[in-house]
């Protein structure tokens, strides 16, 4: 609130990418499974506080939450209401664009808590539709892995913190195990475009194009995809070549996905064999006994962290703080991870994960996969519109 949008530069985009890459290298299987005590406390952190849920002194209150599918299990919302008297009204979206549309359409008045991805900071800063959290009202934030707190620090303006970590996940390769076999170290983004996969691939258009960009860069045919975030000229040059490859290989595409559920449906009903997908949907299917596997490709999985922001027009500020504080317990984090296949940022979750959830994590990130995560860079304000223009040209191509 109050601060004028900053002008985004090549340096700002590059700084975010560099910082998150550094953090990715620091993430090990040990820290990501919950032994975060070995990490030094980050700038947002505070002395470890006991896990708590406020007593039922707020009966009749509500908190309106706009978040992603699977992030707030019904079981959590029920327990939260029982212990606090606060009703959490949960609405889900399938993309950052949908979240931006929902919030801007109501000038933020319909929501108290929203869940922006960390790499969309520049767009939210320009909109000026969030306010700072009162950190004293979120003591359980001390339970969060310090490395993830570090990622949210870039959302600090007007002497306040506008984003807190919640869920992290990846976008890699998922496939039907009865039709394809993926082996770590060999599995590649290029496998989507094998001759035998023609007409059998699913993906989200702009993500597929980003994957093509990283694949071509790995093959020495393009500069690193990170360079596309520096300025419009560089972006047009790189994405022009990406577009040519994408259009030439459009016959490989069987189905597009746009949210969590459509990724699952494409595998179970629409004849898809392989796809570039989020980890959560594929892992859900695998845990349910479907012949689906998910793994980070050798180039490194795309990685993201979704957070929690307080809207500038929030009507239930105290209830919003109580809701967020309750999310930062190991039990709440484990409920989400066990149910969805995504990953909690809270320390101590590993002891509460089911055997299936533990195995799914190990299968998704074998070997050095965690060290090779490719974190989406912060998107300059101009970037999304230009990327979407290339996406639309791809979708319109015959």
Image (tube, helix red, strand yellow):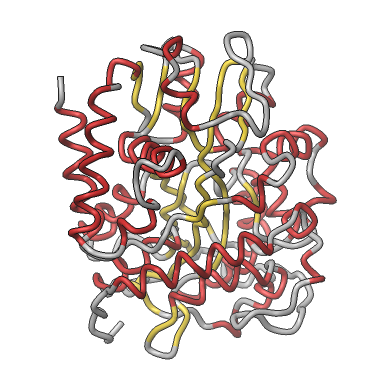
- Residue 230 lies, with reference to residue 397, above or below; the image says below
- Name which residue lies at 37% across and 36% down: 212
In-front residue for pair 91/27: 27
Q: Indicate the quadrant where residue 141 lies.
A: bottom right
Residue 272 percent location from the top left of the image: 45, 15
Looking at this view, name the residue that lies furthest to the bottom. Answer: 159
Left or right: 245 as drawn, with respect to 34: left
Picture quarter with the N terminus: bottom left
Left or right: 314 as drawn, with respect to 44: left
- Name which residue lies at 46% across and 52% down: 89
In-front residue for pair 365/136: 365
Looking at this view, name the residue that lies furthest to the front. Answer: 220
Picture quarter with the C terminus: top left
Q: For residue 222, say whether it is visible.
A: yes
- Name which residue lies at 69% across and 72% down: 140
- Residue 194 lies, with reference to residue 30, above or below; the image says above
Residue 354 percent location from the top left of the image: 80, 38
Q: For residue 94, say whether it is visible.
A: no
Q: Indicate the quadrant where residue 54 lies.
A: bottom right
- Residue 134 lies, with reference to residue 11, above or below; the image says below
In-front residue for pair 214/278: 214
Residue 2 percent location from the top left of the image: 27, 86
Q: Indicate the quadrant where residue 129 lies.
A: bottom left
- Name which residue lies at 33% across and 52% down: 99
Left or right: 96 as drawn, with respect to 320: left
Residue 332 percent location from the top left of the image: 69, 54
Left or right: 294 as drawn, with respect to 263: right
């Amino acid at each position: 609130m109050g601060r004028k949008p900053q002008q985004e530069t090549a340096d700002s985009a590059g700084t975010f990418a560099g910082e998150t890459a550094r953090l990715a290298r620091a993430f090990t299987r040990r820290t990501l499974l919950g032994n975060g005590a070995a990490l030094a406390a980050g700038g947002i952190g505070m002395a470890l506080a006991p896990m708590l849920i406020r007593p039922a002194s707020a009966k009749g209150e509500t908190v309106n939450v706009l978040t992603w599918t699977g992030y707030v299990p019904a079981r959590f919302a029920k327990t939260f209401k029982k212990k606090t008297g606060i009703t959490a009204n949960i609405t889900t979206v399938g993309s950052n664009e949908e979240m931006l549309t929902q919030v801007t359409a109501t000038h933020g008045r319909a929501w108290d808590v929203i869940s922006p991805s960390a790499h969309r900071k520049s767009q939210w800063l320009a909109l000026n539709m969030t306010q700072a959290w009162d950190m004293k009202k979120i003591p359980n934030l001390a339970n969060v892995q310090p490395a993830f707190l570090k990622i949210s620090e870039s959302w600090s303006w007007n002497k306040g913190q506008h984003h807190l970590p919640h869920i992290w996940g990846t976008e890699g390769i998922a496939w039907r195990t009865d039709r394809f076999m993926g082996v770590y170290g060999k599995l590649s983004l290029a496998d989507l475009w094998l001759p035998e996969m023609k007409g059998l691939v699913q993906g989200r258009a702009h993500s597929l194009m980003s994957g093509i960009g990283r694949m071509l860069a790995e093959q020495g045919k393009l500069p690193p995809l990170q360079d596309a975030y520096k300025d419009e000229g560089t972006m047009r040059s790189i994405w022009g070549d990406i577009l040519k490859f994408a259009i030439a290989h459009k016959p490989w595409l069987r189905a597009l996905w746009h949210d969590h559920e459509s990724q699952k449906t494409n595998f179970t009903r629409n004849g898809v064999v392989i796809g570039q997908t989020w980890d959560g949907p594929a892992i859900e299917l695998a845990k349910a006994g479907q012949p689906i596997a998910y793994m980070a490709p050798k180039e490194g999985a795309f990685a993201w962290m979704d957070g929690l922001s307080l809207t500038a027009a929030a009507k239930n500020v105290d209830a919003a703080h109580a809701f967020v504080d309750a999310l930062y317990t190991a039990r709440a984090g484990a409920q989400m991870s066990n149910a969805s296949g995504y990953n909690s940022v809270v320390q101590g979750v590993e002891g509460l994960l089911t055997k299936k959830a533990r195995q799914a994590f190990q299968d998704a990130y074998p070997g050095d996969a965690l060290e090779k995560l490719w974190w989406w860079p912060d998107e300059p304000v101009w970037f999304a519109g230009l990327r979407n223009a290339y996406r639309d040209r791809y979708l319109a191509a015959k």
